[in-house]
Image (tube, rainbow, N blue to C red):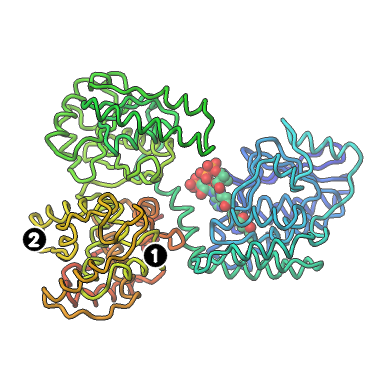
Amino acid sequence: MSVTKEAAGAVTVLRIGNGPVNALSVGNGFVTEIGDAFAAAEADQDCAAIVIAGEGRMFCGGADIGDFDGDPASLDTLRNMQLGVENSGKPVIMAIHGVALGGGLELAMAGHYRIAQAGTKLGMPEVTLGLLPGGGGTQRLPRLTGAAAALDMMLSGKPVSAERALEIGLVDKVVEGDVVAAALALAAEALPPVRPSGALPVPADKAEAVEAARAKLRPGALSQAPARIVDCVAALSDDLASGLAVEARLFGELMASEASRGLRHVFFGERKVARIPGLSSDVRPRPIARVGVVGGGLMGTGITIALLNAGLSVTMVELREEALAKAGATIAKTIQRDVDKGRIAQDKADARLAAFTPAGSLDALGDVDLVIEAVFEDIGVKEEVFTALDRITKPEAILASNTSTLDLDAIAAFVSDPSRVVGLHFFSPANIMRLLEVVRGKATAPEVLVTAMDFAKRIGKVGVVAGVCDGFIGNRIFEEYLRQAWFLLEEGALPQQVDAAMEAWGMAMGPCRTMDLAGQDIGWAVRKRRAVEQPDRPYSGVIDRICEMGRFGQKTGKGIYLYPDGRTAEPDPEIDRLIIEYSAEIGLERRTISDEEIVSRCVLAMVNEGAHIVGEGIAYRPVDVDMIYLYGYGFPRERGGPMFHADVIGLPAVLESIRTYAAGRHGWAWEPAPLLVDLAARGETFEILNA
Ligand code: 3H9
């Protein structure tokens, strides 16, 4: 952390540096240091103008998100520092390069002139953290750019380019090359006048822009940040101080909200899961340039598209000629669709397709750096493939299996060096879903694991490490979630109530619609297997009845719901009848089930299984479970993930509910996880295990 001062004639240049993104930390004293350095320059008789620039890769990535768990009043230090800059009697020029986000852009707006280097991204991402720009952004940005452009930036959270910033009046100049030199040149021309952004008039489009933005707010949204951003812009008046006071008060309220706490947990969680505990930083990823994909089915095709989109060369091996041709056609069609939708240029699509090599034999994989196997889920088939790969591939090539149901260690045993085997469990559609479970076998080499995680990042996925167990992290938890959903149906709820309750709570899709989309036959196959393996852990038979009718969901046009247009779920009175009759058949008197009970049982089933998984060491930390649920299962970001949500409820209360369910019908499904019992007894949270 440092603020360095250089004198260039009568101009003082202050360079602010604090870690990788120059975060404006109040907690570590950095903001105070900037304020002090600024005050010294201000008091310096020989200084006529002040330039502020960022050290390293960027100007500033914003306020320190870690400060938001503390006292909201402490953030006044940041606001006062910015007011000090704005109210300076000497012209202040901001020399902006790389990134100016959130509080970083607010600092820039507190200056009197802004010069940005071409390529700089300027934005207000606070809304993505369930917050509003709380360092004057809601009051200064509209004054500079007009209310509509400001609301657009603040509500989307998306940064704008330096060129766009110039267009909308956010910066005064865009330069190629050294931005500090450009700032010094501006100061040297003729000393520019002091020009505080906060003194600019209220923009003429305020009322209209506020009304338009209000109309677009999503009712029932978990995060109140968008609504409060609009409120702040509505509060713009000629009295800057009163607008700033409204902004600070609303920022404090949002900071304490569950949604913002959840979203902040996600911000740090995404970065935490990339870190593998206990591995030295000397373990470096291997370079991966050429990849082989074995299997041209739905999964292999999706994986191939994801890899081609990331700029990798892919050889797809599929022994069945017809299937290979079909996969090739799907790949070409999907990539072309991105051109048609204006997402990529034709030459880019051409390059992606040129990097694709279809092959009819595994012999084509002699020079690849990584193979991803996505063939039929049968251990005999896997044995054939891996025995051949062992012979054909380079000894340093990594061999990955996309298996979701088989034992990775058994697959690794087919290879003479099992340390090069790892699981890469993609989620369907693999070119869209962000989650990648990276499965560490008992022999997987640390370097192979690190390479797999690096590879996940390279192809735009959130990689999360899971140990070997049936279902790994995601599907193992999902089974318990579904178990409760199906029990709820036989006890008195109907599918539309279960789905509506879970969707109102924030899940992207309720369990019935999810399984109709994934294919009810997939769940049926798992249940049949479980009936043999775990006869003492039954499921409700009601869902099997639906499967026995051949109703597998969207793919058969009917599942729990009807799909008259192939996509939109419509409740089916026949299924409602079937469910009600099933309850009677098993002698269960149906009762009214509240939405609260539906949510509580479905969510706590995830929490309890998640706690088992962390306790067993299958997940490194609770946050790994959280990220899997956000990126693979449509869990609401604002709730942070199941484990974070349990902390919000409080672990003693979570345990009490679980114990109540354990004393009720099918109580065996609610055996409290030892880790949960232990943490609750000690008054601790899951969060302490994330450090
Ligand atoms: C705000 O400003 C509120 C104000 O309006 C009001 C105040 C009153 N704070 O992403 P990376 C860490 S809200 C703390 O890998 P990149 C990050 O955790 C803030 N830490 O780098 C990571 O740590 P680690 C508005 C932060 O080069 C390390 O820095 N700003 C912050 O890929 C490197 O991060 C935002 O929302 C932060 N603000 O991307 C911007 N930012 O190494 C958030 C980063 O221990 N940040 N860290 O895992 C970003 O979007 C990206 O970090 C950025 C750089 C684009 C800047």
Quadrant where the C terminus is found in the figure = bottom left
Q: How many numbered marks have been drawn onto this rendered protein structure? A: 2
Counting from the top left corner in percent of width and height, residue 557 is at: 28, 53
Describe the element under mark 2 as helix, strand or loop.
loop
Instruction: Report whether residue 618 is seen.
Output: no
- Read off the residue under disc 2: 535
Counting from the top left corner in percent of width and height, residue 106 is at: 69, 54
What is the three-letter code of the residue carrying label 1?
Glu
Q: Which mark is residue 463?
A: none
Q: Which residue appears at 29% of the width and 72% of the height?
A: 655
Q: Which residue appears at 9% of the width and 54% of the height?
A: 533
Q: Nearer the viewer, residue 454 or 427?
A: 427
Task: Give the left or right position of residue 236, taking residue 185 as reference.
Answer: left
Q: Nearer the viewer, residue 112 or 152?
A: 152
- Read off the residue under disc 1: 503
- CA gap, disc 2 and disc 1: 32 Å
Counting from the top left corner in percent of width and height, residue 408 is at: 20, 40
Instruction: Report whether residue 231 is seen.
Output: yes
Q: Is residue 318 above or below residue 21?
A: above
Q: Is residue 388 above or below residue 168?
A: above
Counting from the top left corner in percent of width and height, residue 507 is at: 39, 61
Q: Is residue 640 above or below residue 293?
A: below
Q: Could you say which quadrant of the image residue 52 lies in?
A: top right
Q: Is residue 20 above or below residue 549?
A: above
Task: Give the left or right position of residue 531, taking residue 561 as reference.
Answer: left
Q: Are marks 2 and 1 in contact (CB under 8 Å)?
A: no
Q: Could you say which quadrant of the image residue 657 lies in?
A: bottom left
Q: Which residue appears at 22% of the width and 63% of the height?
A: 483
Task: Give the left or right position of residue 418, taking residue 397 as reference.
Answer: left
